[in-house]
Image: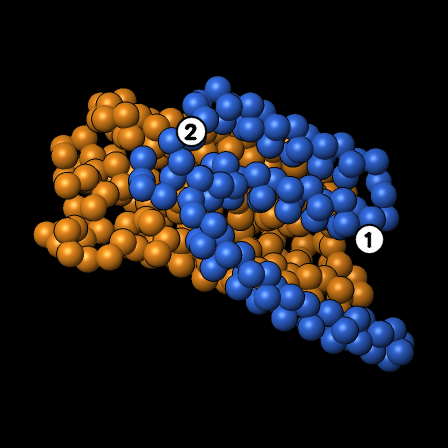
Chain colours: A orange, B blue
Amino acid sequence: MSELEATMHPGHSGVMEESPYGIPSGKLAMWCFVLSDAVTFSAILFAYGYLRIGSSDWTRPFLFMPSILNGLVMTFVLLTSGLTMLAAVEAAKAGRTAAGARWLWATCALGALFAALHLLEWRRMFEEGWRLFQNPTGGSVEFGAAFFSVTGLHLLHVIGGVCALAIIAFGFHRGKYNRIDVEVVGIYWHFVDLVWMFVFPLIYLMNAK
Amino acid sequence: MTTAESSHIPGMKFFVAVWIGLMCIVGIEVIITYQRPSARDLLVFLLVLAFLEAAVAVWYFMHLKFERAALVWTMLPVLAFVIFMMDQIWPDAFRLASMRLLSR
């Protein structure tokens, strides 16, 4: 019995029909979660667009230094973490457990760095007087609501992903989790990466001064 | 490799090339932003590039290209339909903007 068959139909691989999608149920569940989460992020980005169009005094506060540059560094870090995640999946598929765990920890570290850079950006904005419903420039207060909601939801996903990666890395190294688990957490991590590809241009670049 | 995935998933060299391509798209986004086009043109440029990046990420990084077509045809039309339905809010957003102009 192959590892996949064992994961899909434990103990029944000979009698149960194959999954129509040809993937383990855990992986299918993650794809369904990604689909529903994509709708959640779409809704919050649409809400941002709605507020922006409906507001007569929208603020564009981001200077190249430090905000856009910081956003670029964050993008570089997150995209690079996608690459290390791919290396982890490839190592896990090849049966190189130690290398797979190392790449998972590298992804975890890059995710933590992204979160730290994001929190530093938030702290700088708080020091300037930005709040959820407060605009220090005197423009629309809805900017703060939109910015902190969208980036906060994404940051929450990053922090959740870092925790999941740490759990899988630890368990994979000890043999508790298999390569399918690494693939599943990989799909989630690439999705977090994908969402940032919309957040950075729409929230940062569209509001560059 | 799962049963549905083909045996010819490219190696890391290919994925590094994709990563470089994605970074180039981000660079193009920043360059276009500082060419100072109108907000409407900038939105169109950025959305096109963001969807291109997302497509590459889903197709290659998330390995959707290497899964069965049934998975693709289950996921993408549903997402496209929901996003299309959300598009119904824009006339109301423009109505709000117009209302503010009229009230002055």
Q: What mark, if any, has residue B11 been given in the picture? A: none
Residue type pointed to by label 2: His
Q: Which quadrant of the view contains residue B49?
A: top right
Q: Quadrant of residue B12?
A: top left
* Residue drawn at 68 percent across, 61 percent down: A49
Does any portion of residue B5 appear in the rendered image?
Answer: yes
Secondary element at image label 1? helix
Image spot of residue A198 (x, y percent):
61, 48
Horizontally, is A94 left or right of B30 in the view? left
- Residue B40: mark: 1
Residue lying farthest left?
A: A11
Task: Identify the subunit bearing mark 1.
Answer: B
Task: Say which residue appears at 59% left-offset and 61% top-offset.
Answer: B80
Label 2 – label 1 distance at C-alpha: 42 Å
Expressed as whole percent of the image width and height from the top left, the position of residue A132 reads 56, 60
Question: Residue B90: where, in percent of width, then height?
Answer: 73, 69
Residue A141 in the image: state x and y as whole percent. 67, 63
- Alpha-carbon neighbours of circle 1 within 10 Å: few (<14), some, or many (≥20)? few
Q: Quadrant of residue A163?
A: top left
Query: Between residues B86 and A115, which one lies in front from this camera angle?
Result: B86
Which one is in front in this view, the residue at disc 2 or the one at disc 1? Answer: 2
Please name the residue that numbered disc 2 is placed on: B8
Q: Is residue A204 visible in the rendered structure shown here?
A: no
Amino acid at the residue labelled 1: Arg
The quadrant of the image that shows the C terminus of chain B is bottom right
Local SS, label 2:
loop
**Circle nearer the N terminus (2, 1):** 2
Q: Which chain carries label 2?
A: B
Q: Nearer the viewer, residue A180 or A108?
A: A180
